Image: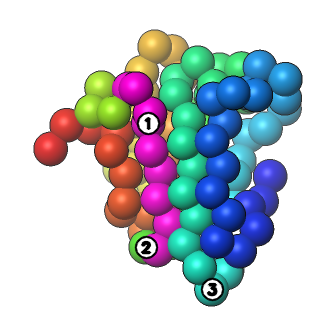
Amino acid sequence: MKTADGQDVDFRPFADSISGVEAIWMLNDANGNLITLESSDVIAMSDTDTLTIYGGSDDSLSAGAEAGAWNFDSTDGAYNYYSLNGATLKISAELTQHDLVAT
């Protein structure tokens, strides 16, 4: 799945109605994008309970009501890995604007 230039997408209202999404691309556009999702959305959308999010430094990810609750698991330099309630997010290390973990 790819976001349009500068598009903000809140997956919470409709995540149960889509499936088979394993990655979201927010790269290569002139304006930043904002994605909002929670762990239940990742599980509903992804067949593997893991969602990869590709983004740049101008893109943002919001955890909605779960802000600050995600666990930082590891990094491999290119991606940071977070988990919560059986869901895993694999996020481009370039995407630094998020509220997954408490600061």
Magenta region, residue range:
58-66
- Measuring 58% from the left and 18% from the top, which residue is drawn there? 40
| Furthest-left residue in this view | 103
Q: Secondary structure at mark 2?
A: loop
Say what amino acid the circle numbered 3 marks: Ala
Q: Which of the two residues, 84 or 15, is positioned nearer the viewer here?
A: 15
Label 2 neighbour load within 10 Å: few <14, some 14-19, many 20+? few
For the residues marked 3 and 2, what is the alpha-carbon distance in whole angstroms?
A: 12 Å
For the residues marked 1 and 3, what is the alpha-carbon distance in whole angstroms?
A: 24 Å
Q: Secondary structure at mark 3?
A: loop
Q: Which residue is mark 1?
A: 63
Residue 97 highlighted magenta (yes or no): no
Whole-percent x, y for residue 46 in the image: 73, 28
Q: Which residue is mark 2?
A: 57
- Measuring 84% from the left and 23% from the top, which residue is drawn there? 17
- Image quarter where the C terminus lies is top left
Res. 14 visible in picture: yes
Q: Which residue is mark 3?
A: 30
